Amino acid sequence: PGFGITCSKMAIATGSQMLGLAANRALLAAPTARETVRSGGTRLFKKQGKASFSSRGSLAACSAAFAAGAMSSMRRRHREAQLSQRMSSTTMLAGEREYDYDLFTIGGGSGGVRGSRWAASQYNAKVGLAELPFAIVSTKDTLGGLGGTCVIRGCVPKKLFIYGSHFKEDITDAAGYGWSLPDGAGPVLDWEKLVAAKNAEVTRLNGIYNKLLNGAGVDYFEGYGRIIDPHTVEVDGKRYTTKYICVATGGRATRLPIPGCDLPGVVTSDEALALPKLPKKMVVVGGGYIAVEFAGYFHGYGSEVHLVFRQDLPLRGFDEDVRAHLKDILVAKGIHVHSGESPLAIEEAGDGKLVFKTDKGSELTVDSVMFATGRKPNSWDLGLEEAGVELDKRGGKVLVDEYSRTNVESIFAVGDVTDRINLTPVALMEGMAMAKTMFGGGEPAKPDHENVPSAVFSQPPIGTCGLTEEDAAMKYGSVDVYLTKFKPMKHTMPTGRGEEEKMLMKMLVISEGFEGAGRVVGCHMVGAEAGEMMQGIGVAMKAGASKVHFDSTVGIHPTAAEEWCTMRTKTRTTTAADVEASSKAPVAA
């Protein structure tokens, strides 16, 4: 009690000068992180008070204690002011249209969560978001989860499985560097342990997404969202009014409508990431990036993989040199490539086996068939058409303008449901631009879809940014092609896998005499760490880098990446006329 009375008297005696000094000291030590402000900084101030007491005596201790109380009050008033400001902002918006929310988002994947968080945290908008309950494997209307396809049953778990599938090759490579195992010893895969660890990680990430929404002040509704009218949404029977609606429902994997497509053991990418048992033999149907990625990792874990696609080469839409190079590597790795074949039917063969038949007479008895034949925008049964939103008649994508706005002024859409560039970082960009357009108070913001770098996590992976050779020639009239193939340094040692890991790098440059001459308009790569390299190249291309910039950059030696700075000899020049002529050439039977 005596100490407390002394403190009180000393504080009164010194007046505002002591309070100002102590408060200034406390402010200098005050935490700046939002989370620490929310906690009141109690631990920091207690620690500060103890140190002051020991070094400067009771006077400084009292000053710090007094200041701590003052700072706590200041923080409380600051938080109240922030809340008042947000409520004022929301009230102002509500006064304009008297809705429950400024924005309501249907879909809790990457784009939906980012757009909602951005609107709430950056523009003080009142935001609600609806997403289905979490599950490892999704359904159309009952199971999903915050994080969406990418986090739960797409990019993240796929990449984790791909990491794991390389270890057997790493052990093989080690023999070329002098390492050995005892006779008969070798790695043993525990598939159930792998799947359980993957499930635990995506479950953790799902929880983080929930915390991110809470931290931004977004109201999360767990249930199926549906649009009732341009300003009303319904979640499991309860309706909410809103100024804006964002549709961010992503896409869903499809199966070809052939006999047997729904038999047990026939899966899509959703189920393939959660198989209870590793298939000894399987068919992957499709030639896109999902198909080659899954074929690669199942092969890495020891499955006999048959990759079946209709065209001559995989990865339609990618650069032709990349496509041909990857096909050669898939064959070199031991994946059975059935190009130019289409599936006819799947039949039960007993003992849990399936018979897969193609139009070329192939019959394969396998444990599982995986369809990787594309994804469909998840736009049906959402009330979009009833609200007047225009959908693509062929594929069902939500049609939007350059600002992600539909033909209904109050309804926007971002991410895969719009089928523009179906990549997670693109959905994030679209979500942030949408929030700025809605609440930024200035010019509407366009997401920039030009020179978006991307990767295919095949084995080895692919990195790409900009245009293919044909597209670049048609757009700019003529491009110079710089192309190199080589065995990576790691496999110059006797690993026995040099042909499986052969690298390709390709650069496209606008030819002299054409507008923009010298600018790099396309970079493509097949080889280890392709995605990591392409991220940096994407920055350079976004900045308008020319071939001169690459040539004048000193490479890092010894790396594969230095090849981007040493490609001096032009391989060929391709013109728009060349492309037109090749497209008219008869196709060999």
Image (cartoon, rainbow, N blue to C red):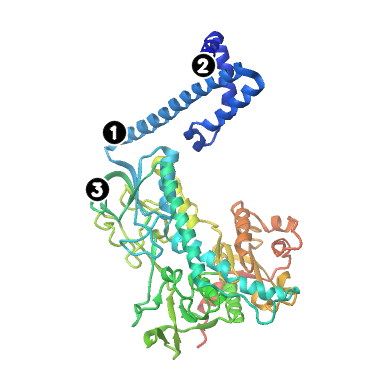
Quarter-of-image position of residue 206:
bottom left
Disc marking residue 239: 3
Disc marking residue 95: 1
N-terminal of the pair, mark 1 or mark 2, is 2
Distance from label 1 to label 3 (Cα)?
Answer: 20 Å
Q: Residue furthest top?
A: 13
N-terminal of the pair, mark 1 or mark 3, is 1
- Of circles 1 and 3, the one toward us is 3
Distance from label 2 to label 3 (Cα)?
Answer: 56 Å
The amino acid type, in three-letter code, at marker 3 is Arg
Q: Residue furthest bottom?
A: 361
Image coordinates for residue 274, horizontal then vertical, percent: 44, 69
Let me know if residue 83 appears in the view.
yes
Disc marking residue 556: none
Tell me the residue that label 2 is attached to.
4
Tag 3 secondary structure = strand
Image coordinates for residue 538, horizontal then vertical, percent: 60, 56
The amino acid type, in three-letter code, at marker 2 is Gly
Tag 2 secondary structure = helix
364 w.r.t. 309: above or below: below
Taking the spot 49% from the left edge, 31% from the top edge, the residue there is 40
- Of circles 2 and 3, the one toward us is 2
Choose between 68 and 102: the one closer to the eye.
Answer: 68
312 w.r.t. 234: above or below: below
Image coordinates for residue 439, horizontal then vertical, percent: 40, 40
Q: What crowding class fits label 3: few (fewer than 14 Cα within 10 Å), some (14-19), or many (20 or more)? A: some
